[in-house]
Amino acid sequence: MSAEPELRILLLRLSSLGDIVLTQPLIHALRTRYPEARIDLVVRKEYADVMRGVIELTNLLELDLTKRNALVELRSQLAVTKYTHVLDLHNNYRTKRLRLLRGAKVRAIYKRSFQRWLLVKFKINALKDAPDVIGRYFEVAKVLGLTDDGSAPQFRNNATREPRLVAIAPGSKHWNKRWPTQYFIELIGKLIIEGWKVELFGSVEDKPLALEIAENVDSDHVKSFAGDLTIAESMERMARASLAITNDSGLMHVASALGVPTIAIFGPTVREFGFMPRAKTATILENTGLYCRPCTAIGKDYCPDKHFKCMKDITPGQILISVEGISVEGMKK
């Protein structure tokens, strides 16, 4: 008799939005390989909505950090299940506490933090042949006999695509990962002239930026939903778009996973960090000729060299060329 039904697998990835979206290919592979297994995922409560539609999961468990003793209580809850395997895809101080479960085989992600530091600080590229983040998740799952087949994240999307509706996410946690505000204003003005309707998305922190953009365009064809929708509501609206334009952010991964053709603008961060979308419908725009790039692994609130060429040299005209290419390709299908 197969022991497969006895498998109880716990995945830990608490944050952030994009990192959690990138767990989907691994979850799908686990369910395909072990259809009868229990597969649970722990995320922070504020990100849980993004994974509620992932049917391959048995349970989606939430860590609510607003509650006192949340870690202790969740760890006690996890101990009851007697997991056979714990795959720590985060490997921070919280997940190190959560994964201390008796009897479980524990594996943790190898983050390659030192190699990342070498690339940022000295431009020594020891990540040239390293897997992307999804590939690093699969490294953790080798204990279960899984290998990465190169699949991109895919969320179910039964929405009817609305022609010439573009979802734009102009924000990012750090300033130097945001394409200039004036560029977004210029781009949106030109998109409206070409018949596009624009919807702006983002977090509560992104709301002032999105409102500034919408007010400066001053058109009935622009609506800002930034800060007004839950993650689930944002996903529902973004799923209708025929195009998304984003910075390197969590909503970039959401749009791409929903199957929306996505133009992703990368400034100070680079491909070697592992976050560029895998989807064939994604277009990456980046300035690859700069001596100073990458200047950070996660983002900064300033440009260290004060020229911000990684973003400023990517012009609205370049984005429009990519938009036209996607539109022409879409008409062929």
Image: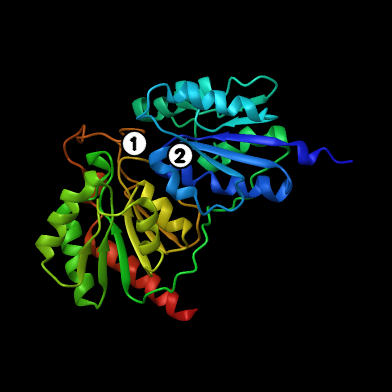
Residue visible at 50% across and 45% down in the picture: 22
Q: Residue at the location (35% across, 57% down)?
A: 234
Q: Position of residue 207 (x, y in %)?
A: 20, 50
Residue 305: horizontal and vertical position, in percent?
Answer: 20, 34
Residue 159 visible somewhere in the drawing: yes
- Please tell me whether mark 1 sits on a helix, a strand or a loop: loop
Residue at the image position 38 percent from the left and 29 percent from the top: 65
Q: Residues within 10 Å of mark 1 (few under 14, many from 20)?
A: many
Q: Position of residue 95 (x, y in %)?
A: 50, 25
Frontmost residue, 56 versus 168: 56
Residue type highlighted by circle 1: Pro
The circle drawn on residue 272 is: 2
Tag shown at residue 294: 1
Disc 1 + disc 2, Cβ < 8 Å = yes
Q: Is residue 276 visible?
A: no
Residue sitting at 47 percent across and 80 percent down?
Answer: 332
- Asked if residue 75 lies left or right of residue 208, the reply is right
Label 2 SS: helix
Viewer-side residue, 122 vs 151: 151
Counting residues from the start of the chain, the first of labels 1 and 2 encountered is 2
Which residue occupies the foreground of this view, 281 or 221? 221
Image quarter of residue 3: top right
Display colour scheme: rainbow
Q: Position of residue 195 (x, y in %)?
A: 25, 78
Residue 24 shown left or right of residue 247 in the figure: right
Q: Amino acid at mark 2?
A: Glu
Return the residue found at the far bottom: 332
Residues under labels 1 and 2: Cα distance?
A: 10 Å
